[in-house]
């Protein structure tokens, strides 16, 4: 009988290992939490550590069944769900209070702090980076401007706290043994900010939940968390100037009230939809419009899975997702290069003129590159590599 192959040579992970998965916080079940759920499902003995956990019981039952959650002491603050974002400056301190040193393997899922969890030198640590801390690095000026924080006492305090966060972020940048980026855009940010190389593994998209809809309805759709950096305001203002075209805005967030106040009668705010209604609305739209700079953008990839073309700002994760009209065979959308009302209005006009060149079937086939099965295989392969490197410790 031939000798059994060494699993380490194949970079197969020990899925029975005791795994600590560290995630910044769980305020809602959005893109980052979908990645978290998928990773935790790959390791039966995984436990999750997160600063705040506000996930509903039904989400826990469906996506995190029998998974133990450990939260920070700040999760018990009175009414913390209403102001947890204001505690961002405590994030580094709170993450460092989690004791994961008794686990065989650490996986951090990080858009801010979780990468800085304290580990043993002989403890493998793999980090899935959704983004370096946006508001501490290149997005600082945008965040300060949107918050109307100049150089007064409050503005200077925030700038000083962000300066300290950059120092902590840089100091902890070499803690993980492997960094994985969720897009080529994030990989370039990791290289520029931390001086590290990263493998790209795109987030999992539940392609199997979508069918390619070829008979589209007469409306456009926007789907995202309604925060200023998503630039949904540009989409709303552009459609105000196109009253003959209907826009459905899916999602909620801190900017929802402001957006409703400026929207014309041709714009409908659907809020949070059930999963089935979300899939139906996204898949039957004429096109999805997105004007923000997203790290990846699972909703954009989901739109493609439903056969819906994507009209997106050509920076960030959209460049990984869209096969642009005029630059690719079987195009799946159009990229525009300026974040302005005029650019959104112009790209909708261009799409109306050339939409027959973008086939729903091509969009759906394009989304298969981001399937959940592909994500699982890539994560397991990377986890096996990290574990194998520590096999002799």
Image (cartoon, grey):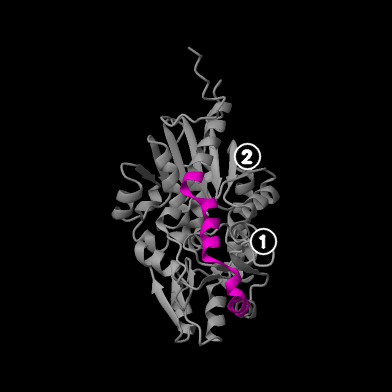
Which of marks 1 and 2 precedes in the sequence?
2
Q: Residues within 10 Å of mark 1 (few under 14, many from 20)?
A: few
Q: Main secondary structure of the magenta part?
A: helix
Q: Residues within 10 Å of mark 2 (few under 14, many from 20)?
A: some
Q: Find numbered disc 2 in the image and state the secondary structure of the residue it sits on.
A: loop
Q: Residue at x 35, y 63 (%)?
A: 276
To which residue does mark 2 refer?
A: 174
Q: Nearer the viewer, residue 336 or 115?
A: 336
x, y percentage for residue 347?
62, 76
To which residue does mark 1 refer?
A: 328
Classify the position of the C terminus by image quarter.
Answer: top right
Question: Quick check: 163 left or right of 245?
Answer: right
Snapshot quadrant of residue 348? bottom right
Specify the segment rendered in magenta.
Answer: 347-374
What is the spatial separation of the Cα atoms under label 2 and label 1, in whole angstroms?
A: 38 Å
x, y percentage for residue 170?
64, 46
Q: Find numbered disc 1 in the image and state the secondary structure of the residue it sits on.
A: loop
Question: Quick check: 331 left or right of 378?
Answer: right
Q: Residue at x 31, y 45 (%)?
A: 65
On screen, 93 above or below 337? above
x, y percentage for residue 312?
59, 68
């Amino acid at each position: 009988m031939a000798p059994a192959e060494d699993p380490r040579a194949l970079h197969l992970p020990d899925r029975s290992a005791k795994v600590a998965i560290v995630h910044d916080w769980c305020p809602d079940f959005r893109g980052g939490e979908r990645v978290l759920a998928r990773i935790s499902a790959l390791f039966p003995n995984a436990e999750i550590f997160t600063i705040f956990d506000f996930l509903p019981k039904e989400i826990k039952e469906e996506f995190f069944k029998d998974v133990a959650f450990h939260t920070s002491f700040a999760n018990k603050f009175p009414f913390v769900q209403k102001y947890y974002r204001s505690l961002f400056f405590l994030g580094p301190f709170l993450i460092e209070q989690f004791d994961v040193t008794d686990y065989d393997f650490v996986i951090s899922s990080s858009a801010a702090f979780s990468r800085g969890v304290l580990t043993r030198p002989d403890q493998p640590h793999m980090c899935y980076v959704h983004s370096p801390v946006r508001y501490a690095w290149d997005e600082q000026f945008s965040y300060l401007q949107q918050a109307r924080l100049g150089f007064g006492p409050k503005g200077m305090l925030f700038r000083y706290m962000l300066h300290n966060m950059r120092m902590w972020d840089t100091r902890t940048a070499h803690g993980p043994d492997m960094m994985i980026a969720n897009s080529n855009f994030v990989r370039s940010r990791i290289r520029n900010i931390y001086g590290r190389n990263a493998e790209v593994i795109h987030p999992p998209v539940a392609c199997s939940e979508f069918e390619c809809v070829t008979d589209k309805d007469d409306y456009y759709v926007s789907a995202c968390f309604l925060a200023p950096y998503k630039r949904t305001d540009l989409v709303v203002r552009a459609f105000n100037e196109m009253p003959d075209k209907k826009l459905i805005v899916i999602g909620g967030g801190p900017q929802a009230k402001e957006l409703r106040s400026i929207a014309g009668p041709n714009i409908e705010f659907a809020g949070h939809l059930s999963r089935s209604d979300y899939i139906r609305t996204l898949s039957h739209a004429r096109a999805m419009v997105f004007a923000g700079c997203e790290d990846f953008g699972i909703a954009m990839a989901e739109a493609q899975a439903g056969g819906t073309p994507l009209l997106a700002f050509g920076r960030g994760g959209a460049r990984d997702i869209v096969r642009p009209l005029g630059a690719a065979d079987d195009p799946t959308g159009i990229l525009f290069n300026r974040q302005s009302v005029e650019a959104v209005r112009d790209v909708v006009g261009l799409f109306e003129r050339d939409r027959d060149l973008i086939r729903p079937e091509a969009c759906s086939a394009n989304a298969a590159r981001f399937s959940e099965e592909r994500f699982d295989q890539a994560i397991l392969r990377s986890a096996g590599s990290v574990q194998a490197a520590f096999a002799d410790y």
